Structures are given as C-alpha cells and as structure tokens.
Amino acid sequence: MLLQGKRTWVYPKPPVIIATGTVVGPDEGEGPLASDFDLVHPDLEVGQPSWEKSERVLLEQASDIALQHAKLSKDKLSFFVGGDLMNQIISNSFAARTLGAPYLGVFGACSTSMESLAVASLMVASGAGEYVMAGTCSHNCTAEKQFRYPTEYGSQKPPTAQYTVTGAGASIVSGEGDGPVITAATVGKIMDLGIKDPFNMGAAMAPAAVDTIQGHFQDTGREPGYYDLIVTGDLAGVGHPIATEMLRRNGVPIEQTIFHDCGLMIYDVDKQKVQAGGSGCACSAVVTYGHLLKRIRKGELKRILVVATGALLSPLSYQQGESIPCIAHAVAIEAQNSNRQGGAVQ
Amino acid sequence: MLLQGKRTWVYPKPPVIIATGTVVGPDEGEGPLASDFDLVHPDLEVGQPSWEKSERVLLEQASDIALQHAKLSKDKLSFFVGGDLMNQIISNSFAARTLGAPYLGVFGACSTSMESLAVASLMVASGAGEYVMAGTCSHNCTAEKQFRYPTEYGSQKPPTAQYTVTGAGASIVSGEGDGPVITAATVGKIMDLGIKDPFNMGAAMAPAAVDTIQGHFQDTGREPGYYDLIVTGDLAGVGHPIATEMLRRNGVPIEQTIFHDCGLMIYDVDKQKVQAGGSGCACSAVVTYGHLLKRIRKGELKRILVVATGALLSPLSYQQGESIPCIAHAVAIEAQNSNRQGGAVQ
C-alpha cells in the first residue's frame, strides 16, 4: 500500500530523479538563479513565428537536455507525463509527438509541474514504468494572450498581478540511479474561497497551498522541521504572506527561514518589472529542477517539499462570473543519502 | 512490475469497476442505447444559464449516481481523476470542487475517458488509492462553440464531421467488490499523419487507434480473438473503416463482427442528423459505462477492449496551420469470472 493517510503516496523505495533539463527566457536569465539553468534564451521568440511555437520549442529543448544528462535515447522512455497552460495543452501534445514516447496528458495549471512529477513517481514506484519523464512549460506571451491581454496591447497591470515565467522544465524518474529521490507526494483538493480576479492569482491559490501542506503533514506524520525548505510554486508577493499567516492561524507555523516561493526566487522582484513575482507552469519547474535539485546535489539542502500551486480558471469561466478553483500538489524530494527518521534510506 | 512490453500495464490482481453513472442529453436519449443510461435529459440546457454550466452539471450528476450505486459517500473517494474537452478542463475542475476529493486533472481530448480509467486502475492496482473515481463529460453546444462555430450560428457541416455527444460518464474503481475487472491498460503515443481538417477527426484519429491496438497485442501477447468486442471511441463512419483497413494491411485483421465504434453505436446514424456519427469525451464513456458494462454484467460479453481516441488539437493550433496530433488509450475490461488464458482469474 503506497497510500498513507488520505491522499499521500509514500514510497518504501523512493524513485530517483536521474536527470533534469531546464530552459528559460531572457527575463529569467537576468534573475538571481540564471546560472542554474541549462539554457538561457536571449529573446522570447526562440526563432519561431508564433509565441505558441516558441513555447513548444522550450519544452522540446528541456526534454532533449534531460535525455542527454541521463545519457538515454528517447526510445528508452517508458512514458512522458506532461501538461501546460495552453488550451488543450498543445505545447505538451506537440512535444510528445516529437518525443514519440507513450504519453499521458495532465492538467493542473501551474501545479502541473508537481502533478506530472507525482504521477511519474507513482508509475516508477509501482513498477508501471522504467524511465518516466515529467515535463511542463509556459511562455509569458502565450499565457498573457490566452488568459488576459496580448502583450502587444501593452495593457497596464495591477501590483497584485504576476509575471508568467518563460521556460520549460523536464525530469526523468527511474527506480535506480544517482540523484535526489522522491519520498512522498500529496495530491491536492480544489480550494475556492470565492476570488474572481485573474490579476490576483496569488491570493486565490494561497488556501490550496495551505490545505495541501497541512494534508501532507497529517498524512505523513512529518512536521515542518523535517524539511530544510518548503517552497510554494507561484504564490508570489501577495499570496505567500497570506499562506504564511493562514498556516500560523491553523496551528502549523512554518519559520520564514525555511518557507519560500519559487515565484519570489526566480526574479529580483524589487528590480525587475514582474509585479508581485513569477507564475506559470515553468516557474516551479525550472526553480525545482534547475536551482533546488542542484542545491540538494551540492549538499546544501537535504530535504525539500515543493508545493506547486495552480489556478484552474479558464477565460470563459472568468467571463461567466465564476470564482477561481485552485489546487496544489506537493512532492517531497530528498538527498539520496538523507537518513533522518522517515526519510529515504537507500 | 506492472509494465508489460513497452507501454501496457497488466494487473495480476485486476481492479474492479464497482459502480458507474451515466447521464446523456436528448439526442442520445433518442438513440438505440437510450435505455442503458441512468439519466436522460429531455433538453440540452439542464436548467442552466450557459452550455458550460450544463456540461458541468452532467458530470456532477454522473458522479453522484456512481456514488449512489456504490453506496459510498463522496468523502470515501481516495481520488478523482478526470478531464474534458473544455479549455483548462473547467467542467472537471468545477465538478472536483463539488466532490471535494483529491483531484488529478488529465487531458487526452476524447480519449480522456480511458486515460482517466487507466490512471485510476493503476492507482488502485498499486495500492495508491482505495476508491478512485474516473470521470469525463462533453456537451454538443460547448464543443461546437469552442472548436468550430457556436450552434446558434447554424453553420452547415460536411458529412465527414461528427456530432459531439452530450453526456457524462463516471466510474468507481476499487481493489475489491463486484463488477467487471480491468485486466490491462495500454497508453497511446501521438500519431499525426498530417490531417489538418477539424471537420474530419475520424480520419485523423484512425492511425492512433491502430497503433494502440497493435501495441496492446504486442505487449500482452493477446490476439484479436481474445476479445468478444473491440470498440474504438469515436472514429465514426469515416474513421472506423480506415482503421479496419489499416489493421488488415498491417497483418492484424479484426473481424467486423467483433470490431465496432462507440460513435456509431450511440446514434441511429442513418436516421439521426449526426453526420458521420458521435464523438466527444462522453461518447466512449457513456457507451462503455452504460451499455457495454451492462452487457458484461448480463453475461453477453466476457472480454472487451475499449480504445478511446482523441484529437489533441486546439482552435489556435488549427488556425496556425498545424496538423492534428492524435492519441488512443486502451483499457481491457473483463467479466470477473472470466478465465480464459491470460484473463482475470479472481
């Protein structure tokens, strides 16, 4: 039985993230984590005639890099699990055509990064896949065009808005190998506190992050101190303080030194014009696969919990006056030699 | 190891479909399978002010019915796995909000019916979930509006076009219980032979169905005669003969008496104005969960293979001149007392 508690999978033999690939655009290349990404593009076009084609190329490059790092040919992949923000997740479907691997499309908006990694880890842990790739991507200009206004229109944004990360992250999970391991994954529930403003996603998503973090602790018996770092996906400057305060009031306080947000880490929020911070499927994907896993490999971090947050609205649901249903999926990643109680003991 | 061959999961202890719920609209209620559905709506509105809200209600009703049939309260669900054709799969995300269960959103266009069932079966078989619901839905007026033209516009359609099924299907999968069992699931690869016409989905999807059927036989060692019935999801009048011919040429002929298509079964194609036949996520879902599982329970069928087909285009990818990437996911469902070689032996 992998199911522990109500909605967490805990792996007796934790699957290994044997390789990752990260690709970002120019704004991310000017941020504080630039040197942690495998490929930084100097422009948003990436040589393509449309923003959507640019986004797809980012994901194709990230998966190619992950395969190179793993020294695997693409025909060795058992499955590719991925999704993105685009209608009908076309970036992933077209990238899956290029990869040629058996493909499961998933969708959790910006939480897709950890949803795909959770599903990939389950497939490996249960013997349902040997090498499973998880991938996701986003592009600032495709997301703005689809969810709000085309960037060419030049509309102003309120300070609560967030800046969609241009980039893609892919990882390869396997039962054996060197690399950080996945010890647990917690599946999110829909939380919807009635926020209807697509320019204030952070506030909308904060309760989902809180619910998943508390669910993770309840299911596993772990406490915040078990982790060296707990990061939310893209709550940014508005949502992250709300989540912090909600956790405190709920009796699960997390010290600020170990509680961070990928949307606040990827940019220099004070200097770069990114409103409240980063967002998008690629935000938590590239920060986790690029920056955080490198810190685990260097020994700077032993155990992290990545809580990717997603706002599951569509432009049409918003136009019809619906509130924004939100979700967060969490994956616990640890150094392979980590051996505190309850951790990986490989 | 559940993985057998390249992309098929075979379950030593097959998960059980303990209950289903099916809801359809008026056109499906005038078709030959009407009496097999749990609830037939006399109109397309279902008391809602928008087509999108109608679609969501269909899924909420189907999941409620499945829970009633299983005599389960919704808090007993370990997970809900679902998706639909709507941008950002909003029907499922809003229905998941109502259900309150931990939720994994998936997307495979019309193949979502079997993608969600495959993932649900894997979760149960691996001990990652106790009761897992798989669900999907479609609505004629939402799909036409989103992918082609609003129905209110009254545009004419070519005879190769298909008619999106209005309906929803939900199933509950568990490790124990009475009901048909899932013995295997085969994950599809993207197939794209260059067709760009969203009014000819059947032809575009036929190669994906063929690839998955052949992959299923290669992986499992089964032959077409193992099954009493092999049904494709929604190839309809244009695509199904193409798939039949491709299989014959590839040396895997399937007798016409055991090879059918849900899109041809759900309507009286000669009398009802449905062009080449039915399509949509709900097409294979309601035919499988309503009609085919009833035939298995009655003993009329012992073993079936449901090969749900999906066209993974978006309106935007079509407008940008892209061809249509297609996929098919297959699930093998058998009577619990079925005991031919390689079958379930519970």
Image (tube, coloured by chain):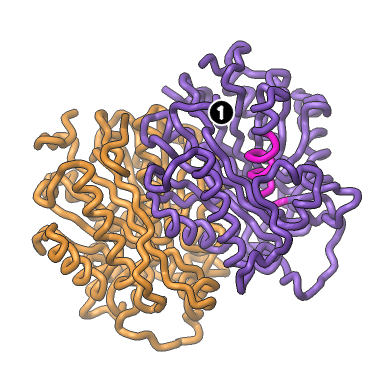
Chain colours: A orange, B purple
Query: Bounds of the magenta span?
Result: B279-292
Is most of the magenta stretch helix, strand or loop? helix
Q: Is residue B285 magenta?
A: yes
Look at 77% across and 75% down and name the residue there.
Answer: B153
Q: Amino acid at mark 1?
A: Gly
Q: Nearer the viewer, residue A35 or A16?
A: A16
Left or right of B196, for residue B94 = left
Question: Whole-percent x and y of residue B85?
Answer: 60, 57
Pointer 1 chain: B
In this picture, is A120 found above or below B277?
A: above
Left-right relation of B142 to B247: left
Is residue B66 among what the camera can see?
A: yes
Name the residue furthest right. B270
B15 in relation to A120, above or below? above
Tell me the residue at 67%/47% (across/down).
B192
Name the one closer to the observer, B63 or B341: B63
Write the residue at 13% across / 52% down. A224
* Residue highlighted by disc 1: B179
Question: Image quadrant of residue B338?
Answer: top right
* Residue A98 visible at all: no
Residue A289 is one of the magenta-drawn residues: no
Image-based side of A36 in relation to B285, left or right: left
Work out whether A209 lies above or below A302: below
Q: Is residue B44 above or below residue A198?
A: above
* Residue B179 locus on image (x, y percent): 56, 28
Q: Position of residue A247 (x, y in %)?
A: 17, 62
Label 1: few (<14), some (14–19) or many (≥20) C-alpha neighbours in 10 Å: many
- SS for dot 1: loop
